[in-house]
Amino acid sequence: MLDKERGLYIAHCANGALSITGKMANRHGLIAGATGTGKTVTLQVMAETFCQAGVPCFMADMKGDLSGISQVGKMSGFIEKRLPEFGIENPEFQSCPVRFFDVFGEQGHPMRATISQMGPQLLSRLMQLNETQDGVLNIVFRIADERGLLLIDLKDLRSMLDWVSQHAKEYTTKYGNISTTTVGAIQRALLQLESQGADKFFGEPSFDIYDLMQTEGGKGVMNVLAADKLMMQPKLYSTFLLWLLSELYSTLPEVGDMELPKLVFFFDEAHMLFDGTSKALLDKIEQVIRLIRSKGVGIYFITQSPTDIPESILGQLGNRVQHALRAYTPKDQKAVKTAADTFRANPAFKTDEAIMNLETGEALVSFLDAKGAPAVVERAKILFPLSQIGAVTEGQRLDIIKQSRIYGKYDTPIDRESAFEVLMAEADRQLAEQEQQQAEIEIPQPETKAEKKKPGLLGKVGKAILTAITSTLAAILGTYVSDKVTGKKTKSKTSATGRVVKNATSAATRSITKELTRDILGNLVK
């Protein structure tokens, strides 16, 4: 609740109002507590307060409850009972301007990113690749960049992997070994990613982060991401939000300290961001969180226990709201002790005991003062929301989507020429060239008139045989007639007829051999 005297009024304790200092709102924060202790309502109260101050927010809606922030709240017995505790007589119930988003495009405006925007590091985490596979993926991105090929959607990356696998020998000496086994493993991971619906996320038009930083009527727009389905794919959910943070960090200019942040980012189920995260990626997350405040962005993590957050990041979260924790096991008791140690102690009570005895809607609160120092922890009650508590109807959601200023901007996907189309065209061109070369080899050349008259090989052999037979018969008849006329007998052991036949046969053989040799040599010369 925005109060001119109190500032960003969030909670009330025995000593009065507890408010977030506007200049310190970009120093990040934490909302922690067991299930059912009031974390979602605290998030809604904070978001409303920022909205009234003109600060847009982004938040993930896990169960649909946060969608009610778009509707005007109303008096209830619970709220009426608590009015005196906050010194409020007539609360002004009001709604917030809201835009609904959905990665799958079902319950809000689609949110897309290109493969290039996501980058190999986040993609590797998303697909849970090992070190070798991660190296090959980096090589693929490098080659695509060198060749000027756009990686927009999953089919672009798949075709690029296939092309690199086929030309692996060309890049081995430059980048290292690229095995077909490794490429196949990455292809299988892509297929699994596609089956989870990631194909709807990767593509164009890609999301413009400046659409998250809008105001309407002096109020900051509440950007609510439908995450009930997205939550079923924890890696996709956390990687998507991490990409969004990275885009904000790389795109927004440095602004230094401001009276109010440009955007407040609520990261629900924050433990998913750090599960199975490599050291290199964890270092990047820490860097983004540490430096993004200078871009005017505040990040608030929502999780069950502070132990879900790495210590290097937990130490950067200055504004804290700790709801009740249960300590049924030694591990739970350790978590309570750790949570208590993160606060500046209050001599009025023991922090660890208070954490286990907090009621629903009650919390331990510590915000940064104007100098950036954490205030002494206070046991306080969180304000009630001025907007509706609970989900909106499908009809109300649809009306809000259609009335949005960005309605239609992201709804129709675009598939322009990218790596897939370029590589397919190149493959088709190579195939056409190969077919043309093959056709030139197989199609016979047209014969000249001289070649048409020239007899073939079989014709020449037949002609030679016929000539030999004719010569043989003529020789036999001639010898026979000569013997009859002269009456002489051949003195050789071999009869004259035999010698004639033998000579004629030898002549025929020589003739056939000569013809065959001439024709074969002629063909070889051609």
Image (tube, rainbow, N blue to C red):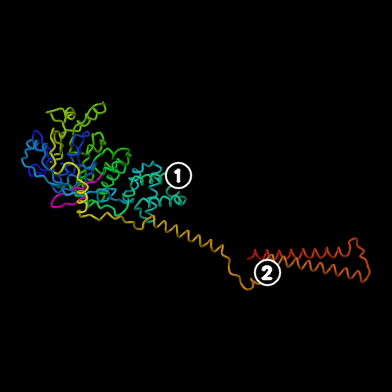
What x and y, as percent, mark residue 3? 9, 43
What x and y, as percent, mark residue 206? 29, 53
Instruction: Tell me how far mark 2 sits from mark 1, CA to CA.
Output: 59 Å
Above or below for 32 versus 419: above
Q: Tell me what residue is drawn at x 31 percent, y 56 percent.
A: 414
Above or below for 253 versus 471: above
Q: How many marks?
A: 2
Which residue is label 2 attached to? 455
Q: Secondary structure at mark 2?
A: loop
**Magenta portion: prevailing SS class:** strand
Q: Tell me what residue is drawn at x 79 percent, y 68 percent.
A: 470
Q: Which segment is the magenta one?
A: 212-226
| Residue 374, quarter of picture | top left
Tell me the amino acid under the disc marked 1: Thr
| Residue 468, quarter of picture | bottom right
> Would residue 124 appear left or right of 443 to someone viewing this image?
left
**Closer to the camera, 141 or 393?**
393
Which residue is label 1 attached to? 181
Asked whether the viewer can see residue 24, the reply is no
Evaluate if marks 2 and 1 touch, with contact meaning CB atoms under 8 Å apart.
no
Above or below for 220 versus 9: below
Q: Secondary structure at mark 1?
A: helix
Whether the magenta-drawn stretch holds residue 459 is answered as no
Quadrant for the N terminus in the image: top left
Q: Is tag 2's residue or tag 1's residue first in the polypeptide sequence?
A: 1
> Would residue 112 appear left or right of 177 to someone viewing this image?
left
What x and y, as percent, mark residue 502? 83, 63
